[in-house]
Amino acid sequence: MVIRHGKEHVEQMLDNMTQIKNDIRRWGQELGFDAIGFSRAATGDAERGLADWLAAGYQGEMDYMARHGTKRTRPAELVPGTQSVITARINYRSASADSRAVLDAPEQAFISRYALGRDYHKLIRQRLQRLADRMTSELTGMGEFFCRAFTDSAPVMEVQLAQQSGLGWRGKHTLLLERDAGSYFFLGEIYTSLPLPPDTPVTDHCGTCTACIDSCPTAAIVAPYRIDARKCISYLTIELDNSIPESLRPLLGNRIYGCDDCQLACPWNRFSPLTREPDFAPRHELDQVTLVALFAWEENEFNERLAGSAIRRIGHEQWLRNIAVALGNAPTSAAVVAALRDRANHPSALVREHVAWALLRHLAPACEDAA
């Protein structure tokens, strides 16, 4: 009799937890999230993988990747008492200008598609907080519990946790992939003390495909599931504060903020749907603008036009550095050379260095021909 009561009690608890998870999913979808999943508050063998990656020096100047120790791989160390992680996904692919067409037009500026609209950090963080608040107000029968929301704002292994929660699998380019959504989406998390049962992880569907590895302009994907950030164009144009290595500059092409080549090459992105979120639509025609036009922006114009954009975080100096490299890779024209000469005496040594390199790319062949 006691055993039967215990079994019934467990079954009732499981039924209650299933209903709670269904409610959280529904609340999340009402807030605009495309998918909600649940993971245990652990990252398995990801801790060893991160340690090996750091030991190889692949993080480059991203010292913050090691700064928090095991708090990144152990959620309960970051937020004591965490028992479960709720993961959320929202698509960002917009009806922007065709990426391939922009990449094939070297006089235009290519900006990673995720950064064309408003900064996702605030939008997703606010919606996650609204979901957390809804949980707190609705799940009063669960007693006291906490929820803490994150979106790229703390040491969280978001891809690992999203994979564990069934939102997709890790592709060979290290991004999360999903059969019906590809990889054009943002992730966010809620750490909670609620003991929510984890969802079933999704199996890998990359097979023998190496399209992402083969497409990387700088060969930054040094092995499946392993990136040397020091070669990655996203790192070079966003995370790196200093000079871009000269040997890599020609490989950047016209990419001035991030790189989408591995995503463009991935067959699963053929099924990636358009976002329902209007804030992710391109602003200021950033999906089809020339390098010369962007290079002319002064600092106040940069700050005003990119207010509320993730791009503004890199600052005007780094913005000019990136565009100078792209102009050095562009076809020689009077407009390109004139734009570079206008910045040749810029107050920033970083900008001057990259402008000088770019000018040499255009003027050296002319000097050789004259000789």
Image (cartoon, rainbow, N blue to C red):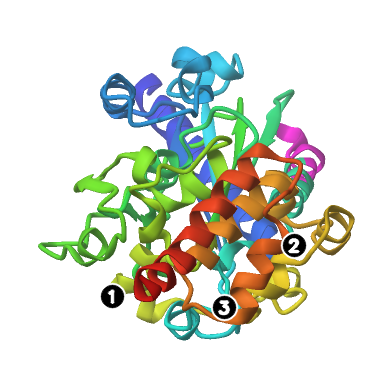
Q: Residue furthest front?
A: 371
Q: Nearer the viewer, mark 1 or mark 3?
A: 3
* Element under disc 3: loop
Lower sequence index among marks 1 and 2: 2
Please provide percent x and percent y for residue 278: 74, 75
Above or below, comparing residue 178 to residue 79 in the picture: below
Q: Residue at x 38, y 40 (%)?
A: 229
Residue at which label 2 appears: 118
Which stretch did the figure color magenta? 133-141
Kindly indicate the quadrant of the structure image that contains residue 334.
Answer: bottom right
- The amino acid beneath tag 1 is Pro
Using the numbered discs, state the Cα–Cα distance from disc 1 to disc 2 in whole angstroms.
27 Å
Answer whether labels 2 and 3 touch (C-beta < 8 Å).
no
Please give left or right for residue 361 compared with residue 55 in the image.
Answer: right
Residue at which label 1 appears: 267
Lower sequence index among marks 1 and 3: 3
Q: Residue at x 73, y 39 (%)?
A: 139
- The amino acid beneath tag 3 is Gln
The crowd level at tag 3 (other Cα within 10 Å; few <14, some 14-19, many 20+) is many
Q: Nearer the viewer, mark 2 or mark 3?
A: 3
- The amino acid beneath tag 2 is Arg
Above or below, comparing residue 333 to residue 310 in the picture: below
Above or below, comparing residue 371 to residue 252 in the picture: below
Residue at which label 3 appears: 108
Q: Residue at x 54, y 67 (%)?
A: 327
Using the numbered discs, state the Cα–Cα distance from disc 1 to disc 3 in whole angstroms.
26 Å
Using the numbered discs, state the Cα–Cα distance from disc 2 to disc 3 in whole angstroms.
21 Å
**Circle number at residue 48:** none
Res. 88 visible in picture: no
Please give left or right for residue 135 compared with residue 222 in the image.
Answer: right
Q: Nearer the viewer, residue 352 or 306?
A: 352
Q: Residue at x 57, y 44 (%)?
A: 353
